[in-house]
Amino acid sequence: MSTRSKTLWALILALSPAAASAQPLGVFLSAAPRAAEVREADAVARQREAERAQAMGRLLPAVTARLGYTRNQYEVGVTIPTGANATRAVITPEDQLDATLSLDVPLLDLGAWSRYGAAREGADGARVRVASATEGVRRTVARQWFTWVAATALRDAATRAIDAADRAVTRTRNRAAAGAGSALDVLRAESDAARARQRLADAELTVDDAARALRSLTGVEVGEAPPLVEDDLHEEGPLGAWEGGAEEASSVRAARSDARVSDAQARAAWFALAPTVNATATQRWTNAAGFGPSGSWAAGVSLAWRLDVGALASARAQEAAGAAARARLERSTRDARDAVSTAWNQVRAGIPRARAARAEEAASEGAARTARERLSTGAGTELEALLAERDAFSARVSRVQADADLGYARVLLRIAAARRIEGEVTR
């Protein structure tokens, strides 16, 4: 692993026992197949596989066995004189038994073969849809995870801001009581403390919502959020090196499979107009054979050819559906490339944004320290300290948001380009 990507992999890589209490992104990404969307796609894939087997069964010989019993009201027979004696031949007995064994062999059925090909393509496409559903869940999981981690960091920062604001309220009240401050300073400090509590409430709401979303998607019980790892701000390489992966994105593979299915269905619709040739063989046993033997067989070949306007219209409709599927494939390929480009540009723009946010945070923290020192020596004012603390908190929020956005953009770029995440292929 290159040094440039250590930060990202430290953020999303696998789970060691030491990391069990703090849940990295890999915990939730690996649980994406548990999501209802993926399980639904998997059930549809199993259905399509059963339909493929059903279509294959229509191409194989079929054996039919029948056994029947009939109670006739009258026995029908004739007496045949044979010299001094007579023999009675029963044509229809009162208790009639019939057994038939038939074999049907499709010799030529182009329509059935084409339908089997379409069913096979459909089964393959359904499996690709499972991968596509998993990719979609992973995108959502990544977004919610970064929201959860960032909101947790903001919640901690808001808690510290409340402590600082409460100390400022106490300080301004004491100064006002001693005649060194004004009531306006007290009101400003109280307003800043109330604003800090509001920010804390907002952060806690975001933490709870994101944690619930993660739990609902993956079924993983959400524990402690890990700290947001500081990105090393490395570049991701040229865009062209990433765009090639768009061809293997699960959305493109699914659209490509849909186009193949539509083409196969169009061929099946046209081949349905072709004649079919079947061979049959039957063995029959009965006790109502009359003058014939009790057992007999028959074999033959039949040709059937059905032409109707409806089948012709169906074939044309399937051709149009194939054209639409190819257009969707083109659109999916374009969208996949655009998704890679968008994520890559987000990373490129996020790097200077994160660098600037860190510089702003460092400067604001320094300004806040200076304002507190000036206030403690009597050289500064309470308003100056309050404004410096407020700017420092805003800078901290910007830095956390910038790091979270950059980390999410890196993960999103790898998902969009079908690259590996947490040791698993995301396609």
Image: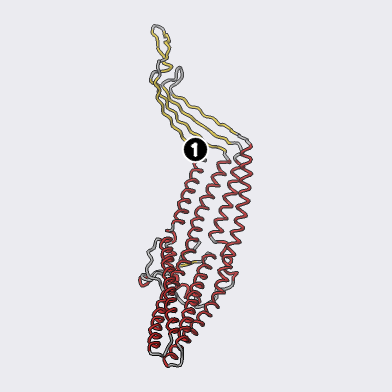
Q: Tell me, what colour scheme is on the image?
A: secondary structure
In depth, the one of 390 and 63 nearer the eye is 390
Residue 243 picture location, percent across and down: 58, 66
Placement of 119 over or under 298, stated as above or below: below
Dividing the picture into quadrants, the one containing residue 343 is bottom right
Placement of 339 over or under 316, stated as above or below: below
Secondary structure under the numbered disc 1 in the rendered image: loop
Residue 107 picture location, percent across and down: 55, 37
Question: In this image, 63 relative to 348: left or right?
Answer: left
Residue sitting at x 41%, y 81% = 165
> What is the tally of numbered marks visible in this picture?
1
Residue sitting at x 49%, y 81% = 391
Question: In this image, 124 relative to 307: left or right?
Answer: left
In depth, the one of 148 and 236 nearer the eye is 148
Dividing the picture into quadrants, the one containing residue 206 is bottom left
In depth, the one of 107 and 175 nearer the eye is 175
Answer yes or no: is residue 16 visible: no
Residue located farthest toward the top when viewing the structure as drawn: 84
Residue 314 picture location, percent across and down: 61, 42
Placement of 83 over or under 256, stated as above or below: above
In depth, the one of 117 and 193 nearer the eye is 193
Specify few, some or many for label 1: CA neighbours under 10 Å numbering under 14, 14-19, or 20 or more. Answer: some
Residue 301 picture location, percent across and down: 55, 31
Answer yes or no: is residue 280 visible: yes
Question: In this image, 124 relative to 169: left or right?
Answer: right
Q: What is the three-letter code of the residue carrying label 1?
A: Pro
Residue corresponding to mark 1? 61
